[in-house]
Amino acid sequence: MKFDAGNCFAKFFRLFLGWLKSCKLGIVLQDDDIHIPIRPDAAINRMNAANALDPPQPNDQYLIATYRKEFLIWTGMCEQVLAAFKEALSQSVQTYLRSVAEHYELATRENILRLIQLVRVRYGGYSDSKAQFNYDAMRTIPAFTSVASADNGLRMMDELVEQRNGWGNANEIFTDGQMRFFLVGKLAKWSELSYVKGLIDVDPGLTYMECRELLGTTLTRLQDELLLKTDEARLMSARASCLYAPQADLVDDRKDIFSSIDQWQGSAASSNVLCFNCEGFGHMSPNCTAPWCYKCHAEWAAIDAPGYHLSNMCPSIVGINRKRPQDVESLPPWKRQQVQRTNVQGQMSGRGREVGGRYRGQIGGRAPFRWPVRSVQQSRSTYPSRGTGAPKLNAHNAVLESDDRDIERNNFIDAFMEYSAAVVAESDQEELLYEN
């Protein structure tokens, strides 16, 4: 903080007082004299003169000692303020003070105020050139186009007004109408402030400070909206970076949508989430780094081995969440028949259906099964027993559904018996090996 001949003395002195208050030295330049120590002249005279009519009092020595202590503290504070004021002045200003001040080095409150007044009269007074420069600076403040530019422009306007007020010339102070004119001229180029500008234009009776309050309310609202958008963008960026960081080299148009939504909501960060790929906890299969893919049953030695891919990027996937052929032999016996039936239905061709068992125009994605053309007698409907509440069934469909259930039950029983026999045989073989 250096004051030169071209600076605003009012701004400099305001900043200098603020710095003194922060250092607990502001009481030196205050207008009141409450902090200046008062010399106890009566007590000093009683102690120095042996007068029987006015003998020393028991409290005189305490008053004199307290005064000397407070005076030393006050003198030290004045010396610090004087040194700080000299340090804040440029070399040319210090040279001027040495030439005109009678006591340049005297550290008293009166002398410090006298030096400040000399600088104010010499460099902070009114002149035609200063007035013209201040007026041109006020007119050339850029128009408000954002919250930051508006805050900066208002701060510059306050500094210029403070400079004019510090000259001490009442004829050169900006009037309320002039300040209102300067402010309205800064609102024309930003559409967000068009409403405020309209309110000011409609009501000529609004003062400059009232216009500033309207503008301040609008700027606060715009700032809050900007902060909200910034926080939302930062939050979305952080979530997106956490979501797609493990798949940075494999991102394409085919993504596991439902897993992405779960991770976006923060469920992937929970320790209760089960991975379908490695059956571990704390992550999902699209982010699993285990060298195994549960969808194509491929296994690698390491994740950098040729052909490695994440489960949601498996080449066996025809589309997003679309049924695909499965290796029947790698499944348990009780699941083979179900997979075989699904694959057979999925491979049927027809209008509106696709290979894999998906049907675009039907909820649930299952392709409709087309039965052969039936006769009128086969299409006859049958009614259930009275009081059962069961819906009416087509006779042909009822027979076919019953046959399907029987076939499925028999296949399941056969598969379970086959699996049970295999388990029993394996157990018998282990017992024979143990006995031998």
Image: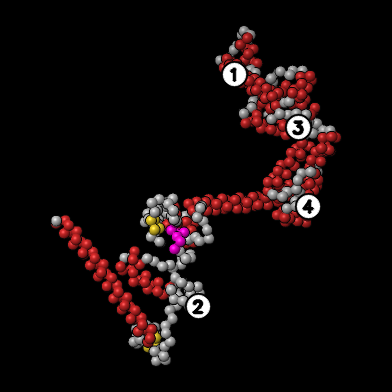
Calculate the distance from the C-alpha at mark 1 to the C-alpha at mark 4.
59 Å
- Residue 8 percent across, percent down from the top left: 76, 33
Image quarter of the C terminus: bottom left
Sequence-first disc among 1 and 2: 1
Q: Label 2's element?
A: loop
Q: Residue at coordinates 81% horizontally, 41% vertically from top-left?
A: 136
- As rendered, which of 219 and 394 lies closer to the eye? 394
Residue type of the residue flagged with mark 3? Asn
Q: Is residue 144 above or below residue 435?
A: above
Sequence-first disc among 3 and 2: 3
Calculate the distance from the C-alpha at mark 4 to the C-alpha at mark 2.
76 Å
- Residue 286 percent across, percent down from the top left: 45, 57
Sequence-first disc among 3 and 4: 3
| Residue underneath mark 4 | 205
Q: Label 1's element?
A: helix
Image-based side of 17 in relation to 315, left or right: right
Calculate the distance from the C-alpha at mark 3 to the C-alpha at mark 1.
40 Å
| Residue underneath mark 1 | 69
Say whether residue 230 is visible.
Answer: yes
| Residue underneath mark 3 | 7
Q: Label 4's element?
A: loop
